[in-house]
Amino acid sequence: MEFSRRDTLALGLGAAVVTVLPFSVNAAADDVIATFTGGADMADSGIELTAPEIAENGNTVPVAVSAPGASAIILIATGNPTPGVAQFNFGPLAASQSASTRIRLAGTQDVVAIAQMADGSFAKAIATVKVTIGGCGG
Amino acid sequence: MTKPMGNTLTAIALAAVAFGTVATADESADLVINGDQEMTIRTAAPAHLSDVMDEINSGWLYRKDETQLLQMDDFDNPGMIFVDLAQDAWNAVDGSEDKSCASCHDNVEETMKGVRAVYPKWNETAGEVRTLAHQINDCRENQMGAEKWKYTGGKMTAMEALISVQSRGMPVDVAIDGPAQSTWEQGKEMYYSRTGQLELSCANCHEENYGNMIRADHLSQGQINGFPVYRLKNSKLNNAHARFKGCVRDTRAETYKPGSADFVALELYVASRGNGLSVEAPSVRN
Amino acid sequence: MASGVKPRVKVPKTAAAGEAITIKSLISHKMESGQRKDKEGNLIPRSIINRFTVEFNGQSVLDMAMEPAISTNPYVQFEALVPEAGDFVFTWYDDDGSVYDTTKSIAIG
């Protein structure tokens, strides 16, 4: 496929539009979200996602999720080759609907957590994590 | 923290890599492990360094909060799973002599206490300075009749970690005089020699620019009191020679071989720059 | 069974009845993502822990699905309720069909 100057310009505009949309991720990540939510609307509150603003190494990034009253939480790394990270299903003996783990991020990207609440509604939280490339491969 | 005014860069180093001064880590933090074991992570430089720096600092100080936290609790520290694995290896019989490490050395917690703090160390029988890894392989070959482990392999680094953790909190105290002196001098020569296409010496980064940024990486003093170290980069334990190899390669030089006499000399010298810091192994770095 | 796989869990030895406790878990596993190539350029096949479950006296605390984006040596921390004395059972499921488990007892006191 060849790009004309106009096509390239249009692509650039498209990219600009994408970046200003409040919640737009790549198609693969969208699929993971759609499978979990069935396309339902998501509230912006009721779930907390904690991740470092800058990760010293993308191989091991500590993240924590918490959504009081949730039955399940999924974690998505929108910029990874396969965006799904984990799904936490909380049982009756979970003392809180929260968990933390360590994840791999292929580069600077948005990490998304979506909770399914007991009433079937959904809530999401987004955190941007900058992944640094160190000077020393060592 | 006090630092020498040694941040003068040579034109060559400037051309090769850009050092910056963005402060990213909490350099005033204290390292207490499991809530009760305090580590010496900053202390007066040993006498042989008095001309170049006042204070020596653990590499832990130069890491970001999240990485620092991983080392403050033995459960959070992924390096400790390899200590567990090595404990099994310690008790496992291997080789033609039907012996395990424990056959001769009994309980690792008692017999190996203090060992890591004084290595590399002169071995009188062998007539050379030996690293801990060399000594482990010497035992395997000559006492157990077992295969040597790869110098930088997982079994070796795990065993180094098990032995090292028994000295955790004790001050590094390698001998640099007597029969070890010539090896130490050789290591010092290497430390200050520029190598590779980038013409960088160890000192260019770790003596003249610690605390500064090299691209997105916060340069430490290159202390090895925390080795073997669990690196987030490769999610495994790394011993000092593996790290040296990476550093030398990054100067775009042909590296020395892990376990070689050159790296033994360098390890002795670099270890001696940390005399007084706590043994931290297994530490966690990026 | 993959070699060198060792689970570790940290559970308090005692709790008050009905108390919420923090549990930490770690298992040594390379979590080969299926994205990497070997020296010859061939894709290294995916080999991960894909599921981790925690039960107390047969009741679920956590059932977690893991993808290749979980770091090497998977670590999970969470909170559990302890209604009575009993056993926590932790189970990890490997892509290769192996199952690793460990049990920790907790007393009321």
Image: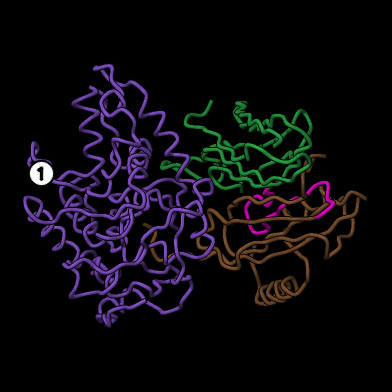
Which residue is rendered at x = 27% and y = 69% of the image? B44
The answer to whether residue B254 of the structure is visible from this angle is yes
Q: Position of residue B86 (x, y in %)?
A: 39, 34
Q: With B10 as the anchor, is B283 left or right in this view?
A: right
Q: Which residue is mark 1?
A: B128
What chain is colored green? C
Which residue is rendered at x = 13% and y = 63% of the image? B189
Q: Secondary structure at mark 1?
A: strand
Q: Which residues are magenta?
A: A68-85
What chain is colored brown? A
Which residue is rendered at x = 68% and y = 58% of the image? A78
Residue neighbourhood size for the residue with mark 1, other residues' Cα within 10 Å, grouped as few (<14), some (14–19), many (≥20): some
Q: Amino acid at mark 1?
A: Glu
What chain is colored purple? B
Q: Residue B259: which quarter of the image?
A: top left
Q: With C45 as the anchor, is B282 left or right in this view?
A: left
Q: Position of residue A77 (x, y in %)?
A: 67, 56
Q: Residue C25: which quarter of the image?
A: top right
Q: Is residue B100 above or below residue B149?
A: above
